Amino acid sequence: MASEQADKMKAQMVEFGAALFGDGSEPPTLDQMRAPNMLDLTTAPCPDATFTAVDAGGVGAFWVDIDGVATDRVLMYVHGGGYVIGSAEYYNQFAGHLAKATGARVLNVDYRLAPEHPHPAQVEDATAAYRWLLDQGIEPGHIAISGDSAGGGLTLATLMSLRDAGTALPAAAAPISPWADLEGTGETMVSNAATDVLVQKEGLAGMAGAFIGAGSLTDPLAAPLHGDYRGIPPLYIVVGGAETLLDDARRVADKAKEAGVDVTIDVFPEMQHVFPIGVGNVPESNDAVARIGAFVKTKLGI
């Protein structure tokens, strides 16, 4: 049974969803969609963290540090928001918790958003930030990548883009509730529609259209469900059992395993989309972030 704190976060997600998608009378404007920040409701502050704005190879980002972290180990984070909303600044407190859990610095990347900047702007920014890390002297084996929702899909797309370009790959990646199928064909898009309070097919379709622009909904670097996983580093995938994107995570895990990738998928029963953002307030979220931290520590040698 979900904790009392998880139920409270679920109610907060309902509140955020109403602000994001409106009451159905008329669609919200882009500015209205971008105004609320769900993490203000769900994520506990991380007072031990410091945030330093940086130009990461032409891409805005924040260095997120905790005293005592390994400065030669980095978790690169790409935030969620359907490629249309959200920002690195919104996610700084969450990134602080990740730095604490992993023992590594976090580079929290502020990639460009659609519809002003449709695909492939996002994967271009993520790969540019990763290459900037290499230019700073960080070894590829000392880097991991993570992201939630759209950022989880972008994590996978970034790995594929780097591999296809012949760039040395990071040690590992930890996608959270990855959005990997822009067409919404997963069985749980229907079977979990009644339990997911935040993500529904109609809303995703609108974000997918804004994100892809004139491109294809099956482009592997936009919808990594359709990608080739050969040579991809180990993956640790976290996903909620109540969310409509559960099958995105499952199908990615299956496809990656078939390609010989070392994959662990961790399904948390009854949990909502991107539930780890409740870290500091919700026991299940704390558990998930601790597991991500343990995975990253092992892969980065911390």
Image (cartoon, rainbow, N blue to C red):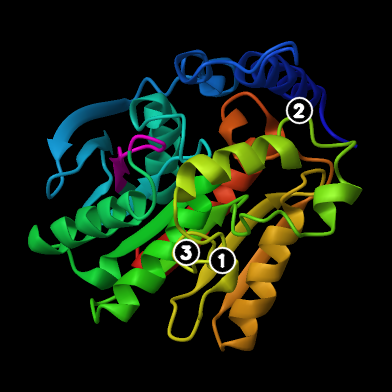
- The magenta-colored residue range is 105-116
Tag in front: 1 or 3: 1
Q: In this view, does 182 lie above or below 114?
A: below
Give the vertical position of 302 relative to 201 (above or below).
Answer: below
Q: Which residue is drawn at 83% across and 53% down?
A: 188
Q: Which amino acid does label 3 sit on?
A: Leu
**Image: 119 above or below 8:** below
- Residue 148 in sight: no
Does the segment drawn in magenta span residue 111? Answer: yes
The residue to which callout 2 is attached is 6
Which residue in the rendered view is the most extreme toward the front?
214
Q: What residue type is labelled 2?
A: Ala
Q: Distance between the residues labelled 2 and 1?
A: 34 Å
Describe the element under mark 2 as helix, strand or loop. helix
**Measured from the top left, where is residue 30 in percent x and y?**
48, 21
Q: Which mark is residue 156?
A: 3
**Amino acid carrying mark 1 in the image:** Thr
Residue at (74, 20) in percent of width and height:
14
- Residue 114 forms part of the magenta stretch: yes
State the residue in front, 160 or 170. Answer: 160
**Badge 1 is on which residue?**
218
